[in-house]
Image: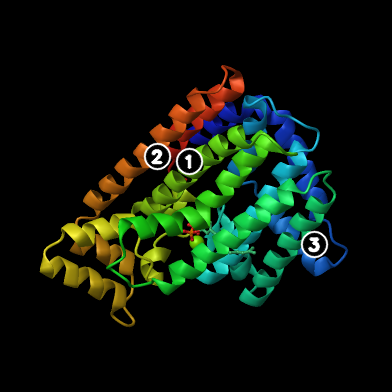
Amino acid sequence: MSSSESQLARLLEPVQPGIERMREVMLRQLIESSHAVGDMTDHVGRFRGKQLRGALVLLSGEATGNTTDEHPAVAAIVELIHLATLVHDDVLDGASVRRRVACVNQRWDNQTAVLLGDFLYARAFALSTDLSSRLASRVLAEATRRLCVGEIDQAALRYDFELSQERYEEIAGAKTATLYAAACELGARYPGGREDVGSSMRQFGYELGLAFQIIDDCLDVVGDERVVGKSVGNDVEDGKITLPVLYAHKVGDDATRAAIRDVFTRPDLVGRCERLRGVCDLAAGVEFAMARAKELVDRARDRAARLEPSAHRTALMELPGFVLERRW
Ligand code: FPP
Ligand code: MG
């Protein structure tokens, strides 16, 4: 286990029993009599990822005095939706490595990966119908709608260097922060009521999730695939203009801007991300983006600090710092 993996394990320690139950519920949903599907669910089920979103359901519940027997199932639903979105996302991005192993689209093919993503999504919603309250289905259906809109808007704005930072954040927020926000809201208010505490925890999750995506976008341009554990450089290959690139483009002179656009758009160019690092001050872009991520993380930490003191509150206060420091 790397030192940041053990740091995360330590942070999530107060909800470890709940995480174990969440895993059991999730794995039960992956059982399928078809050998073909079973091979794939084994593949995606073996690799745990950070399980941050599921853990946030549990931590938010405990830290706000709202725990029920159904919280691990709610956490499992959130993780299953997350997994479905990643399987689909890797098809869209043509990615090859995720969580240190071959993506489903790489090991099998795009068609199969789309169907497996659908399968996982269907399992998540089947599980939500077993719950005693419809709140989780309602909140998560809305979160899924918003993350799909975020992905579609992102695709529509590829190669658009006139993108504002505000619009970039709206899209990053929709595609990633929405599910973090839903996880924290559900933790704090499932099975219902408690609108105020739910809204505050939703804000916490949104700030944390937006910071997570900004950092993800920095890792995509300067991260090391062996450390990050997934394909990097995809955003440049796909024409996605992320915050570090937007900033490098904005502060560059005319020649630099033209060179950045050329790296993104010249047909058949090989190694676009590597070339991008050579034509502009990407380090300045990353520094700017990380400063914005830090603002969000500080806000999230301050919000968690308003909760009653407990081991769970401590974890919620330390998670933003972990997200900021993460390299995977
Ligand atoms: C990661 O972005 C992508 C997401 C957080 C959301 C992807 C969502 C979809 C493709 C919609 C799926 C819809 C359903 C109903 C399952 P990224 O590519 O920036 O991050 P990465 O580096 O982890 O790939
Ligand atoms: Mg991706």
The amino acid pointed to by label 1 is Leu
The amino acid pointed to by label 2 is Leu
Residue, disc 3: 38
Colour setup of the view = rainbow
Name the front one of labels 1 and 3: 1
Name the front one of labels 3 and 2: 2
Split into quadrants, the picture shows ligand 1 in the one at: bottom right
- At 59% across and 31% down in the image, what residue appears? 9
| Circles 2 and 1 in contact, beta carbons < 8 Å | yes
Task: Compare marks 3 and 2 and give the one earlier in the sequence.
Answer: 3
Distance Cα–Cα, label 3 vs label 2:
40 Å
Residue, disc 2: 296
**Of 45 and 290, the residue lying toward us:** 290
Q: Is 149 positioned to the left or the right of 47 in the image?
A: left
Distance Cα–Cα, label 2 vs label 1:
7 Å
Q: Residues within 10 Å of mark 1 (few under 14, many from 20)?
A: many
Tell me: residue 152, above or below residue 25: below
